[in-house]
Image (cartoon, coloured by chain):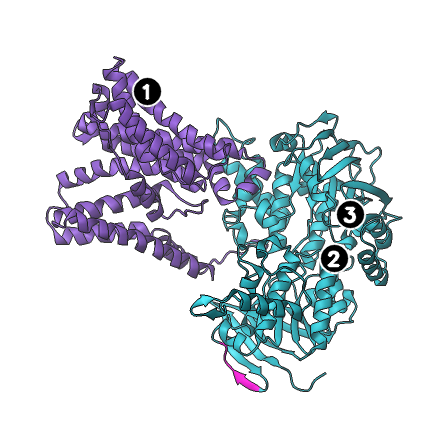
Chain colours: A cyan, B purple
Amino acid sequence: MNPQPLVTLQNVGKTFGQVTVIKDVTVSVYAGHVQVLLGENGAGKSTLIKMMAGVYQPDSGDIVVDGAVVTLPTTRAAEDLGIATIHQELNLVPTMSVAENVMLGRMPTRHGMVDRRALRNRARAALALIGLDVDVDTPVGELGIAKQQLVEIAKALSINARILILDEPTAALTRHETQALFAVMADLRRRGVAMLFISHHLDEIAEVGDTVTVLRDGEFVAEVPASTPEAELVRLMVGRNIEDQFPRRAPVLAEPAEILAVENLSASGSFSDVSFTVHAGEVLGIAGLVGAGRTELIRAIAGVDHYDSGAVVVRGHRLPKGNIPAAIAAGIGHVPEDRKGQGLVLGASVNDNLGYATLASTARLGLADFTGQRRRAQAVAEKLRIRMHTIDQPVGALSGGNQQKAVFGRWIIAASTVLLLDEPTRGVDVGAKVEIYELMNAITDAGGAIVMVSSELPEVLGMSDRILVMRDGRIAGELSAADATQDAVMTLAAREAGSTEIDAIVDDIESDEPINEPINEPINEPINEPITTTTDGDLAAVTRDNAPTHEKE
Amino acid sequence: MSTTTLAPARRRVDYKKFLANNGALVGLVVLCLALFIATPDFLTGQNLLNIGIQVSTVAVLAFGMTFVIVAGGIDLSVGAVAALAAMVSSWLFVAAGLPGWLTLIGGLVTGLLAGMVNGLANAYGKLPSFIATLAMLSVARGLTLVISDGRPIKTAAEVSFLGGNLGPVPMPIVVLLLSAVVASFVLNRTVIGRSMYAVGGNAEAARLSGLPVKRILVTVFALAGLFAALAGLLLAGRLDSAQPQAAAGYELDAIAAVVIGGASLSGGLGKISGTFVGALVLVVIRNGLNLLNVTSFWQQVVIGLVIALAVGVDVLRRKTRNS
């Protein structure tokens, strides 16, 4: 490791009002080195990078660049020292061309007019730095998110950034796009760029990082090599052992009734001829690459989108197409992919958000049932351990995991018996993930059924009782929990697509440790009595009888 | 355990919170005090009744507008719809010879229908509400001129009664208070009212939760049309005639009242009480400037600055609260 770091945050601290968000943290980035910042949501990662980027000023401690103490009053000051941030929300103007975006704020001019030729040439040179091959006249909005990210990196490099802060760059990327990004990062590392990398995906750390700084509750916990085992990283991050990352317990039901049947469902351009059934007490996982039609399928079942042919049958009743209220009345609850955009009204209270699905059904003469709603919301919030100040707090102020619990809570109040989960733990930190998995257990314990779409293979393998793999809108295969391995799933998911990409993906997977432990085996605590009444299966029972057990706090 | 409340700091926080959440009300009180000191004519019974009458039209229009803005839309047609409703009512009376009470209902139904058309164009026709209601503004104003041939038409006695007195109290004030109660009830207590907040806050999340977003939007605009019609009838009642150019530009006052009252044009936020205060702020300023002999030209300048100030303060407040 190079002796002198490019940037060091030296014993920095930051307080907002009476809340200390960062306390005495030291972190350094070195040329040609990827420093990973790891911590749960709220651990202080974003505050820390904002200090390095000139957004916030530390209340105590120093920022040292090239051995000299500096102040960074503005992001501009940080950029002048070669520190650039690639934010999760990209700072690009979607309607402007790639060239204009790369050169934004430094348009080359001739006689006071934009010099188009110089603009294109300089932009091309910038893109060449990372080997990105796109037409510089394309509006940025027409590029995929991965390419937009690379455009932003090119832009940063073209203003001579030596230090790149990458704030969860892989959160919105597919596996393949992530690989492409990592290739660029590896190249930058060879060329001596220092990088500070944030990710929620533990498996990416060993792949791309050199050393890891772990934060917890705003404090420095440890600095460890990136090769540290995941379990150890999790322990450092949450401050306790997480016994089982995927605590699936399938209930033992005498004769599990078929709850949901999807028959030859097709929607042109999205999926075709999809059939499957789900039984009471079962978690059906749906795996596949992004674009395989999984989300579209889930949305069609939930009544969000129309489909061309086929049928969705819940307990023998065929649901009308594209009719969300009918699906809800039949017991379907949909936890959509995009929590903030589709799941919650962020500005509205936790109470309101928990009650939307039952607003009309609990009303009398068109009048909303205020007291009843409050009572139900309070009960569910307590059972699901939604951490909040009051139930009237805007739901947008909660952490990702607690927001997701609020979406679940809505369907628990609605007594839904078929939950359709689309990426249920995206943007949720490790501790809250386990709570959500326990909630899934409780739902199936109560006789409910779950269909889960997830791009996180370990999650699909760890939490499903049965796995469907989709490819190009069709079901490519079905695997039992016992047979499923990452390899088996990926082979089904990716067969016939471009061969080199697949090799890369499969290579990558082969290096991973096998994850599937026996899943169906009950874990020490007693399984709840088998629930045989599935026709009127009441998920609210979850909140009364089978509250998930948590060790937290 | 899971719900931690900050008990010790509670009192002070609530007091601060009240001020922060009721900036418009504080402004109104300050304004009234200043006018009380500046001119002896302000705090007289007659002037207060005047203010009440003047505020009634703006506030009733603005109540309807509050529904639309809470649901994330905008309604530029309320002034024109108000004029059209009053004109249809008078036409039914004079040309069609209908009984007075029926012409009153006819006016209200006209507003309701015009609003429904707005809602249908917005929800099902996918026109942005700005465009749909801009079109309606032109159509409704045009129809008003067509029906009236550009001339005022006298109103039925039942409509004129709305502009008269109930004992010592002017009817517009009675109507104003009643519509405030009704509007507040609808927004706070009913399913449709609560749904408006959800639709305005995040229409997609509302839809995925099973709320009938399109029907809600149609209802919202229909309600705005209904309130606009009522405002139009109030105005006509005061003049004993429906004027072809009545309520021109009132949609901007209504929007200003809602926004001064703390609603957000991006939706999901707003209260009837806030709108009421917002309308009062506008009317009291105009009234006070009149009493102080400020010309109507300067009044427009002042009103503009007040709107900018009110919303600016609000934006600043939210920003500081969020960080």
B228 displayed left or right of A529? left
Name the kind of residue labelled 2 in the image. Answer: Arg
Location of the N terminus of chain A by quadrant is bottom right
Tally of numbered tags = 3
In this figure, which residue is indicated by the disc labeled 1? Answer: B106
Please state the chain letter of the residue tagged with numbered disc 3 in the rendered image.
A
Q: How far apart are labels 3 and 1 at the CA level?
A: 60 Å
**Pointer 2 or 3: first along the chain:** 2
Image position, residue B304 (x, y; %): 27, 51
In which image quadrant can residue A136 be found? Answer: bottom right
Image position, residue A199 (x, y; %): 67, 64
The answer to whether residue B164 is above or below residue A104 is above
- Residue contact between numbered discs 2 and 3, judged by CB atoms under 8 Å: no
Q: Which mark is residue A287?
A: 3
Along the viewing direction, whichever of A391 and A101 lies nearer the viewer: A101
Query: Which residues, given as a range, are shown in magenta?
Result: A68-72
Residue A45 seen in render? no
On whether disc 2 and disc 1 are found on a single subunit, the reply is no
Given this view, does label 2 or label 3 mark the residue nearer the observer? 2
Q: How far apart are labels 2 and 1 at the CA level?
A: 63 Å
